[in-house]
Image: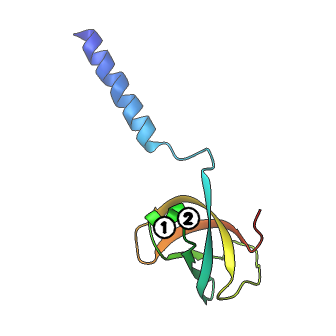
């Protein structure tokens, strides 16, 4: 009986700690997209054909408040590096950590 309770408590603690742990690996992903709108510090893009993020949304928006200025304009193709999840809204939202018109 004590063994069962102990196992249950260990399982419960592990479950809670796993679900509350934030992503500390710096899980960054990127995608290529065409800029379709720039409004102040908000950019709306359409991912290029073949990008995995298209499984989540066909239009993505992000803020450039904390990003370097790259002098991009509507119609330019950019590489967007983001962290976290794709927010389920329309257009979808990501937290961009950088963007560039240079591709490697």
- Left or right of 25? Residue 98 is right
Labelled disc at residue 51 = 2
Which color scheme did the rendering employ for the protein?
rainbow
Q: In terms of image quadrants, where is residue 104?
A: bottom right
Local packing at callout 2 (Cα closer than 10 Å; few below 14, some 14-19, many 20+) is: few
Local packing at callout 1 (Cα closer than 10 Å; few below 14, some 14-19, many 20+) is: some
List x then y, in percent, for residue 14.
41, 30
Q: Quick one: 93 or 52, which is closer to the camera?
A: 52
Contact flag, marks 1 and 2 (Cβ < 8 Å):
yes
List x then y, in percent, for residue 21.
49, 42
- Left or right of 6? Residue 60 is right
Distance from the alpha carbon under mark 1 to that under mark 2? 6 Å
Q: Quick one: 86 or 103, which is closer to the camera?
A: 103
Going 52% across and 61% down the picture, which residue do you hit? 52
- The correct choice, above or below, for 89 with respect to 31 in the image is below
- Left or right of 95? Residue 67 is right
- Left or right of 55? Residue 78 is right
Q: In terms of image quadrants, where is residue 2?
A: top left
Going 54% across and 71% down the picture, which residue do you hit? 49
Element type at marker 2?
Answer: loop
Going 68% across and 74% down the picture, which residue do you hit? 78
- The correct choice, above or below, for 19 with respect to 28 in the image is above
Element type at marker 1?
Answer: helix
List x then y, in percent, for residue 17.
44, 36
Q: In terms of image quadrants, where is residue 13?
A: top left
Residue named by callout 1: 54
Instruction: Determine the residue located farthest toward the front in the rendered image.
Output: 50
């Amino acid at each position: 009986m004590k063994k069962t309770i102990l196992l249950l408590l260990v399982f419960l603690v592990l479950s809670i700690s796993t679900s509350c742990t934030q992503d500390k690996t710096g899980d960054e992903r990127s995608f290529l997209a065409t800029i379709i709108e720039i409004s102040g510090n908000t950019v709306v893009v359409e991912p290029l054909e073949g990008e995995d993020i298209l499984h989540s949304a066909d239009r993505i928006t992000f803020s450039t408040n904390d990003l370097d200025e790259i002098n991009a304009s509507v119609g330019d193709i950019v590489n967007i590096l983001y962290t976290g999840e794709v927010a389920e809204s329309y257009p979808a939202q990501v937290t961009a950590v950088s963007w560039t018109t240079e591709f490697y």
